[in-house]
Image: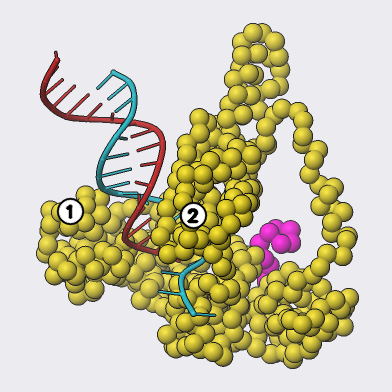
Chain colours: A yellow, B cyan, C red
Amino acid sequence: MRTAPTILHLDMDAFFAAAEQAAKPSLRGKAVVVGGLGPRGVVSTASYEARRFGVHSAMPMSQARRLVPNAAYLVPRFALYRAVSDQVMELLGRLSPLVEPLSLDEAFVDLEAGGAADGEASARAVGKRLREDIRAVTGLTGSVGLAGSKMLAKIASEQAKPDGLVLIVPGTERELLAPQPVRILPGVGPATGEHLRRAGIATVAELAEAGEDELVRLLGKAHGAALYRMALGYDDRPVNAERESKSVSVEDTFDVDLHDRVRVRIEVERLAERCVERLRAAGRSGRTVVLKVRRYDFSTLTRSETLRGPTDDPAVVREAAGRLLEAVDTTGGVRLLGVGVSGLADFTQEDLFAQAATAAAAAAGEGAGEGAASGGGGGGGGPAADGGESAAEPEAVAGETAAPVERRWLAGHDVRHAEFGPGWVQGSGVGRVTVRFEEPGSAPGRVRTFRVDDPALEPSEPLPLVPGALIPGAAGSG
DNA sequence: TCTGGGGTCCTAGGACCC
DNA sequence: TCTGGGGTCCTAGGACCC
């Protein structure tokens, strides 16, 4: 807890939907819903225009379509959101070395650590300037909360939404929180809220009155104690810029339930491979393999197996996941499968063996020379040291690009036409693809339809939302 | 056309060790 | 032989968040 409101929380407004509206001028001011478009999709983000009709995150897409049949429905384009997120995080990094991203569109910043602000006036000025910079660089709006703690800064940004700034003056926390419903506190969701309601606790004031012992009795040791402190407005968690991920997982919900055991097995193996790809891309390895199964009736179970050492070997993870599957009853059908790896390390067991071998060799007085790749902090992604296979990667891929693969025109994705220029796919089917020709910063554009195999039409990368603004990592840094 | 995907943290019981 | 406790690891599930 500090006496100056120098913890900043930034939350971009309706981030995915706003990014799509910025990318597609014809959607500005219109209801836009981003999420899964399959039969079992849910809403990721709805634009404020769509929220007015009751659409919100996590709502089944089918329900959203009933509420707003005329909205634009789009799949998420994470490459675009990540690029915009990088721009925003770069701006935050200019304020302080202590930036803690919570997701693509949210972060805490410790303004004191950066020397950017030391009191109410300077903090407010920094927040105001940040919002202006974000708008200038990304074309999007973000809301800012400023307070003396993470919890209050987050509550402040929520109150600031959309497109605002709220500063909570230190010392006023308790009176501000007291009349609020308990659900305002982070960590109080539907279950805890209901639990407390049944105990006659509806507001933060009542939470504080109940006392720590009572809350621990109701909710358990950690949760009860944490909630009591938060109810008093007390929160001294530091902004942590160095959080490392603790697990990696992938999962798929199928459009229709899977019944065929062989098919289930194949899907599990595919998921294991995708999971390992992500693991390796992050330069990590893991010891515990987790299989997740959601059955036809939505009942969900997990089975896990801890290996003797960390691995990033697809075969090892695939086989572990396969063993775990054998112990699961899938009669009735499978709705979702997932494979995850936790117990992450920066080294694999093979690395350790290699290290041990190197050490042993060194001890034996042999190869004193260069072997010592390892070392502590190293990012060094290098997979196993042993000779072998490394040559195996690029050429197959290179060859494939040249071949005329069947192109799929994904709704909402960017394209470029040799004659008409940049646009995006509005829809496709029966051999035709409909494109709207517009781009960030342009006037709303017109629609044209082409044959799906029109050679003048090609997929393209997302364009910067503000023409001319630099997307970090795209061109040379400068 | 009910209910995504990627995470974090906590609890609780059993095994095992001291 | 009985009694007791503490700590750590593993597994499974649940709540919560974006």
Q: Quadrant of the C terminus of chain A?
A: bottom right
Amino acid carrying mark 1 in the image: Val
Residue A405 appearing in the image: yes
Looking at the image, which residue is at 65% across and 13% down? A361
A127 lies left or right of A311: left
Return the mark for residue A330: 2
Magenta span main SS: loop
Does A476 appear in magenta? yes
Between residue A470 and residue A388, name the one nearer to us. Answer: A388
For the residues labelled 2 and 1, the Cα–Cα distance comes to 38 Å
Looking at the image, which residue is at 51% across and 60% down? A334
Residue A379 appearing in the image: no
* Chain ID, mark 1: A
- Depth check, mark 2 against mark 1: the one in front is 2
User: Which segment is the magenta one?
Assistant: A468-478
- Return the residue at label 1: A216
